[in-house]
Image (cartoon, rainbow, N blue to C red):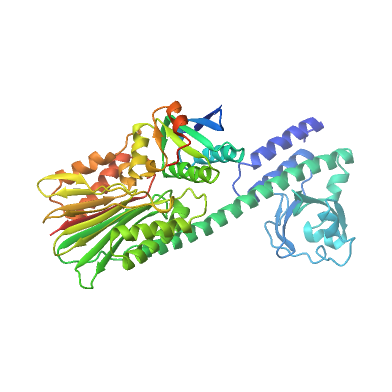
Amino acid sequence: MDLNIIEEQRENNVTILKLEGELDVYTSPKLKENIVTLIDAERPFVVLDLKGLSYMDSTGLGVMAAGLKRARENDGNIVLVSPRKIIQKILEITNIDLSLKIYQSSEEAIAKLAIKG
Amino acid sequence: MMKTNYEIIEFLNRVMEKSRSAMSLVERIEICLKGVGEAIGIKKSAVYLWSPENMCFVEGISSKWLPLKSQRIISQNIISITSEETIYYKLRKGKSVIIDGKEASSYIPDTKSIFVFPLICKMVFLGIFVMDFEDIIIRIDKNEVFELISMCSHHLSISIENVQLYEKMIRENGRYKQELNIAYNIQRSLLPRNIPTIEGINISAKSLPAKIVGGDFYYFRRFRANKPEVGIAIGDVAGKGVPAALIMAMALSTIEQCVRHFRGPEIAFTKINSIIASHLEKYSPHYVSAFYGILNLKSNNFTYCKAGHPPPLWYRAEKDICSLDAHGTVFGLFKGRKYEQKTVQLKRKDKIIFYTDGITEARNEEGELFGIKRVKEIIIRRKDLKPLQLNTSIFRAVKRFIGRKTQKDDMTLVTIEIL
């Protein structure tokens, strides 16, 4: 299945990326490209809205974590919003939720974005 | 024979289409030459394929009207490179030439002169299309014949290039598969060759990569100095195939070394994370999950740490199943992480089932996940099974569950039982 990314720019260099579909070894390069482009364009604060994400594998998770490292090196941050239960589980088992913080809404995420994990 | 050029062109197009369905290059060329003969009456013709390595023509394929067929011919005259005006250089530049006399007969028997058209595709010289010149000059208007020959040569060149690329791809694929098989054997040898026989416990392990090589691993270590202990580890590199296999080799080696030097899981894990993170490139999306525990064979205490790995199942004999969980993130992503160490007391007939997520995340044709619940059900229902049979039973259940779907991720199970 494919991955759809809808971009929504907000003030203070924050961008919301709404993910729809599946994030796996085939589609994760697309997300990586989006994140790198935003950070290079000096928009290092990214909110990943995962409401529409039905599946994620280890490659997808790796791309999100690598994106976070890159954002932090550019004084930014990446946070997650509303992952479905199955994806939340992967984040919890790998304990990556300690670094990639999860929030229940984009507004809450944007408010907390400046706080590093 | 067709009268109008339009009819000829239509016919030749159909012939070229038909030739593309032929599997071998020789067949394709034979179909084209037959078509040219039927369309414009040039029956005495042949194609010679060029070998850049040998600097000569290595295969001649003739039309059905000629006796010679697929002969190996080395033409000394045509490959002479002493002068700029040689035939070879003219052909390489895309110019057609006429060859008279005895030389002509060496390409097409019983001819006085031949017309040679170069076959070139994407600036690569592939061979020549040769025709009895007499066949040509008695045909309809010369220019139109040359245009038709040019069109046929163009199609022949593309055909030859396609088949040669395909054959190269098959050869390279064969070489790649050979290398993968060698890599498979190397990877197998990194894993414990034999399951150790250790007094007081029964251990079994089973691992199945999704592709030929994979990212799952397991490890046992029997500590002999002053304490009777055995270390057991299981791990999973994010991803699969060759990239995961390479990282697996690095991660396993790191774990082996650290476990040897730093006995306690907590200290070992902190060190392992630091080393693996430094080995991976700056923005690498790769990481390694692992679980490691030390079993004291006298007291049956099991001390463990978890690094983002699915928590193993602890079957407490005649009681229940619970998870051996602890805080700790995957190796390789973030340096300086802490790992929580825990200890549990095992009893006789207890089992611990270590697994990788390829088991629980296996999907069937309806998209349903195998899940941890099914694994627990098998463990409880078949509590009589020894570790080897239990692993086999779980693997069989997963295989039945996924049905015709291909295995998507590496799958590994390690089961220990306290005797």
Q: Quadrant of the C terminus of chain B?
A: bottom left
Vertically, is B373 above or below B93?
Answer: above
Q: Position of residue B231 (x, y in %)?
A: 26, 62
For this rendering, which residue is in front, B11 or B79?
Answer: B79
- Outermost residue, left direction? B318
Q: Position of residue B74 (x, y in %)?
A: 74, 65
Q: Quick check: B260 left or right of A110? A: left
Q: Position of residue A62 (x, y in %)?
A: 45, 45
Q: Indicate the quadrant where residue B168 lies.
A: bottom right
Total marks drawn? 0
For this rendering, which residue is in front, B223 or B92?
Answer: B223
Q: Position of residue B331 (x, y in %)?
A: 39, 53
Vertically, is A45 above or below B396?
Answer: above
- The residue positioned 45% from the left and 50% from the top of the image is B286
- The residue positioned 26% from the left and 47% from the top of the image is B325
The answer, for residue B37, to whether it is visible in the render is: no
Q: Quadrant of the N terminus of chain B?
A: top right
The answer, for residue A42, to whether it is visible in the render is: yes
- The residue positioned 53% from the left and 59% from the top of the image is B175
